[in-house]
Image (spheres, helix red, strand yellow):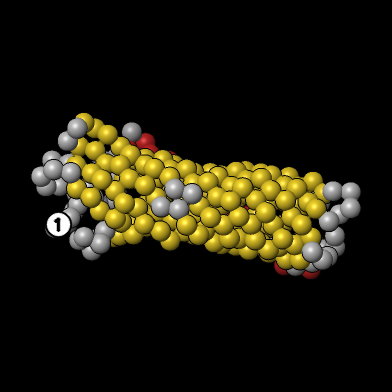
């Protein structure tokens, strides 16, 4: 299973990069005054648990502590009701983890890891504009790559994992003016098989490698600002 996951990840990364490069609007589109938007994001990510059990003496379980998630994106409106966006999101947090392995020492071990979650995503959205033009609802799906950066304060080791990620979101934009809007949204991001595996859980020496992964789900409530860089409302 681990080999299959590694193969999927190796194909997912270049595919995501190709899709992102394809989605970036070119100079010709900007020159034609197409509707291009700069989106700035901020929101609260709720706690999420992860775990992997082999038996009573070989397991780990932990929690990604909630906190601020921030980022930004460029959205190109293919049509007034359809948009495609490349976006980056980041959360700096920590992950208290309990684990036990045959080589991690006697008894149950605990470490509060430093964790950074980075998402590079390509998203599509369906927009619905109210009759007065002041409110614009939207919803859509995202796919891309999650980069989890983990540091063990007990032994100074750090590692990262790059995994396929997907997401969905639903919200609305309230236009304060022709060019500036306030975005409100709920969002779910999932990093597939991102916790475990390549990370080291241990307090001494090189630490202890864990043989399997755990998928995480991060739910966010928040919003941000929308700036129109081209086009007319």
Q: Residue furthest left?
A: 106
Residue at horizontal 85 percent and vertical 63 percent from the top: 232
- For residue 197, what is the image quadrant? top left
Q: Taking 193 as reference, is 76 left or right?
A: right
Q: Taking 107 as reference, is 44 left or right?
A: right
| Image quarter (top left, top right, bottom left or bottom right) of the N terminus | top left
Residue at horizontal 14 percent and vertical 57 percent from the top: 204
Q: Residue furthest top?
A: 55
Residue at horizontal 41 percent and vertical 52 percent from the top: 65
Closest to the observer: 45 or 230? 45
- In this rendering, does residue 16 appear at all? no
Figure label count: 1
Residue at horizontal 64 percent and vertical 57 percent from the top: 223
Closest to the observer: 3 or 194? 194
Whether residue 94 is situated above or below residue 59 in the rendered picture? below
Q: Which residue is mark 1?
A: 204
- In this rendering, does residue 121 appear at all? yes
- For residue 174, what is the image quadrant? bottom right
| Image quarter (top left, top right, bottom left or bottom right) of the C terminus | bottom right
Task: Characterize the local packing of mark 1: few (<14), some (14-19) or many (20 or more) Cα atoms within 10 angstroms.
Answer: few
Whether residue 231 is situated above or below residue 106 in the rendered picture? below
Q: Position of residue 6 (x, y in %)?
A: 36, 42
Closest to the observer: 60 or 73? 60
Q: Position of residue 131 (x, y in %)?
A: 89, 48
Which secondary structure, mark 1? loop
Q: Position of residue 84 (x, y in %)?
A: 68, 52
Q: Position of residue 48 (x, y in %)?
A: 43, 45
């Amino acid at each position: 299973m681990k080999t299959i996951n590694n193969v999927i990840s190796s194909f997912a990364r270049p595919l995501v990069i190709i899709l992102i490069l394809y989605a970036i609007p070119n100079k010709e589109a900007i020159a034609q005054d197409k509707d291009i938007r700069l989106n700035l994001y901020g929101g609260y990510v709720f706690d999420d648990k992860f775990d992997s059990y082999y038996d009573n003496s070989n397991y780990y379980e932990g929690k990604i502590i909630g906190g601020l998630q921030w980022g930004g994106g460029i959205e190109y409106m293919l049509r007034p009701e359809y948009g495609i966006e490349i976006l980056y999101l980041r959360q700096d947090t920590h992950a208290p983890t309990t684990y036990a392995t045959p080589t991690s020492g006697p008894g149950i071990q605990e470490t509060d890891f430093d964790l950074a979650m980075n998402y590079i995503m390509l998203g599509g959205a369906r927009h619905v504009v109210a009759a007065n033009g002041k409110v614009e609802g939207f919803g859509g799906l995202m796919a891309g790559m999650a980069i989890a950066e983990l540091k063990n304060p007990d032994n100074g080791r750090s590692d990262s994992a790059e995994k396929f990620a997907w997401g969905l979101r639903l919200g609305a934009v309230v236009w304060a003016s022709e060019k500036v809007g306030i975005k409100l949204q709920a969002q779910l991001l999932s990093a597939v098989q991102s916790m475990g595996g390549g990370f080291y859980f241990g307090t001494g020496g090189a630490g202890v490698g864990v043989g399997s992964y755990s998928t995480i789900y991060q739910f966010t409530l928040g919003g941000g600002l929308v700036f129109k860089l081209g086009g007319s409302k």
